[in-house]
Image (spheres, rainbow, N blue to C red):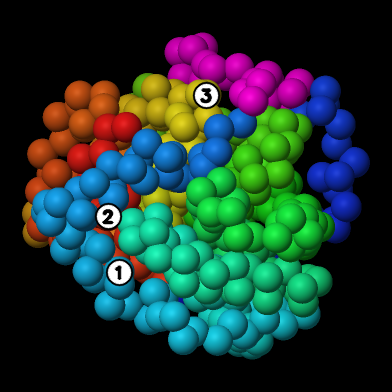
Amino acid sequence: MSPWRDGSDPKRSRRNALLAVPLLAASLLAALVAGPGGGRAEAAPAAFVHPGVLVSRGQLDFTREQVNAGAQPWKGAYDRMMASKYASLSRVPKPRSVVECGSYSNPNNGCTDEREDAIAAYTLSLAWYVTRDSRYAQKAIELMDAWSGVITDHTNSNAPLQTGWAGSSWPRAAEIIRYTYTGWPQARVDRFRTMLRTVYLPEVANGSHSNGNWELSMTEAALGIAVFLEDRAAYDKAVAKFRGRVPAYIYLASDGALPKAAPGSGLDTRDEIVRYWQGQTTFVDGLTQETCRDLTHTGYGLSAISHIAETSRIQGQDLYPEVADRLRHALGLHAKYELGAAVPSQLCGGTLKDHLGPVTEVGFNALHHRMGYGMTNTQNLTESRRPAGTDNLFVAWETLTHAGNSR
């Protein structure tokens, strides 16, 4: 199954658009979008926490402790990661100046190479932290340095999504290596920062009017990049995008007869909203804008929501309470049908396509273990599919990093 099934071609963000947005404007933009019930955490943290993209130092320590103790499911998840191609110390990076990604993988000029090198850098950074074997840190650095010294742009119709996927993985790796290993030369760290700021951030920062998984993945990348760059304006802008998109991606009955429209989407009429929601006219708690498209793309959206909320929690601006009801209903609804329940005729014509992928661990851990929600269907699905691997796009090894991890 090709990951490039989005056929839309959203307007490309201008290369320097974000760089012209001052801190005050971004902060005001964030303030315009209220969380559910009016409750909200305000602006970016005064001091960023490192490592702090998807996984914190405390979470990494927990992961290392469990693996070294041989405890399950962490040891099995670690073994699966280490057996993967992404943990190989003989990996040769394949950077290129311009990564060209069209719809349906046509063309695919460097797209798979970029995503997989980024996932490999993150994988190797996790391997470094668990083993303290510097070879893994050095290999992660080799991959990051190779790309930061070459890439200048992403082109063609899937450029925003590709940038979001790769741009979600790079900061995770960079955060772990930069703040737990001393062997990354400052000049190369600075070059990597420049790559994120000039090649990735302008492409993802302004979001997308395409399907919701596009904007959510792009926003995840923007938030992670903002943390590594310690850029408060970029961070606040990403949070504002998140707060506008999540209520427009996951439906709750409290929204009314129709789902909410994302800010700036231009969806004004019932027919436009129904068309955007894949023709669905019956809306239930937890339904997503892409459920009736397929569960794979739905999984991308739910995963990005979980990742963004997780990073915000680490940074001291916990967004989980704002999205908890939507996320728990969405995970539960889709898990129910993944577990084999009959799909009613009023839901997507009685047929759901494809599968969610390894995307439930982060949200389930936060909502169930930290916040105390009962999530029987999500728990059964998550535990039955452990250890979670990678989707080869931007999700990787989340049983290892987040199963039962309350730190």
- Which of the two marks, 1 or 3, is nearer to us in this view? 1
Quadrant into which the N terminus falls? bottom left
Q: Which residue is mark 2?
A: 400
Q: Nearer the viewer, residue 368 or 156?
A: 368
The amino acid type, in three-letter code, at marker 3 is: Gln
- Residue 27, given in percent of the width and then of the height, sits at 74, 23
| Rendered image: mark on residue 81 | 1
Query: Label 1: how many residues lie within 10 Å, few (<14), some (14-19) or many (20+)?
Result: many
- Residue 38, given in percent of the width and then of the height, sits at 51, 12
Q: Nearer the viewer, residue 282 or 52?
A: 52
Apparent side of residue 14 relative to residue 252 in the rendered image (left or right)? right
Disc 1 + disc 2, Cβ < 8 Å: yes
Q: Which residue is mark 3?
A: 317
Disc 3 + disc 2, Cβ < 8 Å: no
> Which residue is pictured at 64% across the width and 25% down the height?
47
The amino acid type, in three-letter code, at marker 1 is: Met
Q: Earlier in the sequence, mark 1 or mark 3?
A: 1
**Secondary structure under badge 3?**
loop
Magenta stretch, residue numbers: 27-47
Separation of marks 3 and 2 at Cα, in angstroms: 24 Å
Q: Nearer the viewer, residue 318 or 381?
A: 318
The amino acid type, in three-letter code, at marker 2 is: Leu
Separation of marks 1 and 2 at Cα, in angstroms: 9 Å
Residue 130 visible? The answer is: yes
Res. 182 image quadrant: bottom right
